[in-house]
Amino acid sequence: MSNWVRAHTNIALIKYWGKENENLIIPMNNSLSLTLDAFYTETNVTFDDDLKSDQLYLNGHMQDFNALIKVKTVLDLVRKKAGIKTKARVDSYNYVPTAAGLASSASGLAALAGSASRAAGLDLSSKDLSKLARRGSGSASRSIYGGFAEWQKGHSHETSFAVPVDAADWDIGMLFIVVNDKKKDISSREGMSRTVNTSPFYQGWLDTLDADLNTMKEAIKNQDVHKVGEIAERNALKMHATTLGAKPPFTYWSPDSIKAMDAVKQLRETGFSVHFTMDAGPNVKLICRQSELEDIKHHLLVDFKESQLISAKPGPGLHAISKPNL
Ligand code: DP6
């Protein structure tokens, strides 16, 4: 019997940036994201008595030990909960450019939590799936849900999980400007840890988060795409500002990221309600009306190739599928 599941990626509008507990992945702050239809991971876990160690196949290729670290954390938790010791084979297909800041770890670890728990015979609630996914990668806690989700930081393994906020069944979408799909140098894990430990701007980031989160929730309730974008853009810029104060300093921006940000500003001047956000990579994600996605894409073709532009609509939460979409 197979246990294929699909989880979609999510992009944070209020960022998770920093851990209070690195081992349990308890964040410093609540975060809020939108799950998207365009990027997802499909995963099937099989526990097999004949295996001597866990194995991960990503897009058909066997992965080395390093790639297995986050996966093993989730598998170990599932084994403990199910009272089994059996090793597992994980087959995973990413419909996401891996490690380009397009949040493959969010969909990947959420899908893993879903499939591994099913394969072990556990019937977990969304809340428990969110906690399990979180232990693999913090942002994965939010990919259990479709639409907008908030990861409530909590203070322990039991109290740190995401909850659904809004179905996002209104006129909102995202457009990705892929400026570089090569593997990034500094992982989000390393980047946030260095920032928390060394950046004098980190406290400033934390100080304004509650206000950002509250106004964001209000804007979502009012289905105010302009306000949602405005808050998200400023929140992302504040997050990225903390990295410049780190020791040694770093940035995820490339020259093309700045070119994309300028293009967004120009689009706004043309009258579009469009803002951007960025994660731990150089790609720029635009927040706009779903009904204006194609129009905005058309304008961007002056500066970017068609292959660099990917439209995304709100997507569903974690769900079982009968077979992978190869
Ligand atoms: C910038 O979830 O990848 O995308 O918990 O260490 O695995 P770990 O980090 P990860 O961090 C994502 C950071 C971010 C912002 C966000 O998604 O909220």
Image (cartoon, rainbow, N blue to C red):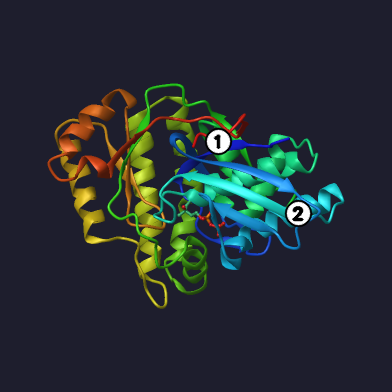
The disc labelled 2 sits on which kind of residue? Answer: Leu
How many C-alpha atoms fall within 10 Å of the one at disc 2: few (<14), some, or many (≥20)? some
Asked if residue 178 is positioned above or below residue 250 in the image, the reply reads above
Q: Residue at x 35, y 30 (%)?
A: 225
Say which mark, if any, is on residue 324: 1
Residue 77, label in figure: 2
For the view shown, which residue lies furthest in the bottom direction?
A: 248
- How dense is the environment of label 1, judged by Cα within 10 Å: few (below 14), some, or many (20 and up)? some
Which amino acid is tagged 1? Answer: Pro
Q: Nearer the viewer, residue 53 or 223?
A: 53
Asked whether 67 or 223 is in front, the reply is: 67
Q: Is residue 108 left or right of residue 125?
A: left
Q: Quadrant of the N terminus?
A: top right
Q: Residue at x 80, y 39 (%)?
A: 121
| Residue 124 in picture, x, y percent from top left | 75, 37
In whole angstroms, how far apart are the C-alphas of marks 2 and 1? Answer: 25 Å
Say above or below: 279 vs 308: below
Q: In this rendering, is residue 211 above or below 250?
A: above
| The quarter of the displayed image where residue 223 is located | top left
Look at 49% across and 37% down and name the residue there: 326
Local secondary structure at mark 1: loop
The residue located at (39%, 63%) in the rendering is 184
